[in-house]
């Protein structure tokens, strides 16, 4: 008799757990995820209701970025030592005139890299040049830009 009463309860719990997990992965609108101060600081209070809805719709359609590993300071580690590092080929967004010693470079694949040394090199100006970022020694990376004869050490920031 007692078992007969527990069966419906057990079945309900078993069905509810996957539903809760699915609800946890569903998109939560920006206004609910941010404090009013954060919302205003980001300039989102300037958007119309339709613009905010469009932004939320766009964000909900793009998967979350989950950083699997972080260093001791909480910063993302994109290539842990145990993973094989492979060259990255993409295009730089915007105009390129050389390496300034402190540049940050956004690629069309969504990655962002910054210069890891203070080396400066002038190069011919080119819009959206092809780049190749290759693994180097001791966990370093070298960035080569189309029509530029020099390379610099870079590290990935996003």
Image (tube, grey):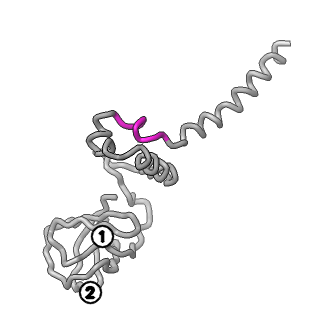
Q: Is residue 28 above or below residue 84?
A: above
Q: Quadrant of residue 81?
A: bottom left
* Residue 75 percent coordinates (x, y): 31, 49
Q: Is residue 67 left or right of residue 27?
A: left
Circle 1 Cα neighbour tier, 10 Å, few/some/many (<14 / 14–19 / ≥20): many
Of the residues under marks 1 and 2, which one precedes in the sequence? 1
SS under mark 1: strand
State the residue lying farthest toward the right. 1
Q: How many marks?
A: 2
Residue at (20% x, 85% y) in the render: 124
Q: Quadrant of residue 99?
A: bottom left
Determine which of the numbered discs, if any, sits on residue 141 in the image. 1
Segment colored magenta: 28-35
Which quadrant is the N terminus positioned in? Answer: top right
SS under mark 2: loop
What residue is disc 2 on?
Answer: 147
Residues at marks 1 and 2, CA–CA distance in whole angstroms: 19 Å
Which is nearer the eye, 123 or 2? 123
Residue 75 appearing in the image: yes
Circle 2 Cα neighbour tier, 10 Å, few/some/many (<14 / 14–19 / ≥20): few
State the residue lying farthest toward the top. 1
């Amino acid at each position: 008799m007692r078992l007969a009463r527990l069966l419906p309860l057990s079945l309900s719990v078993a069905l509810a757990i996957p539903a809760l997990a699915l609800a946890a992965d569903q998109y939560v609108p920006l206004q609910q995820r941010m404090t009013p101060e954060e919302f205003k600081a980001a300039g989102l209070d300037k958007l119309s209701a339709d613009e905010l809805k469009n932004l939320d719709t766009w964000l909900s359609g793009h998967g979350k970025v989950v950083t699997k590993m972080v260093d001791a300071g909480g910063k993302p580690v994109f290539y842990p030592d145990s993973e094989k590092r492979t060259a990255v080929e993409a295009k730089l967004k915007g105009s390129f005139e050389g390496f300034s010693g402190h540049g940050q470079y956004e690629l069309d694949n969504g990655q962002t890299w910054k210069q890891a040394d203070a080396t400066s090199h002038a190069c011919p100006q080119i819009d959206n040049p092809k780049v190749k970022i290759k693994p180097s020694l001791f966990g370093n990376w070298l960035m080569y830009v189309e029509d530029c004869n020099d390379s610099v050490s870079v590290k990935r920031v996003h």
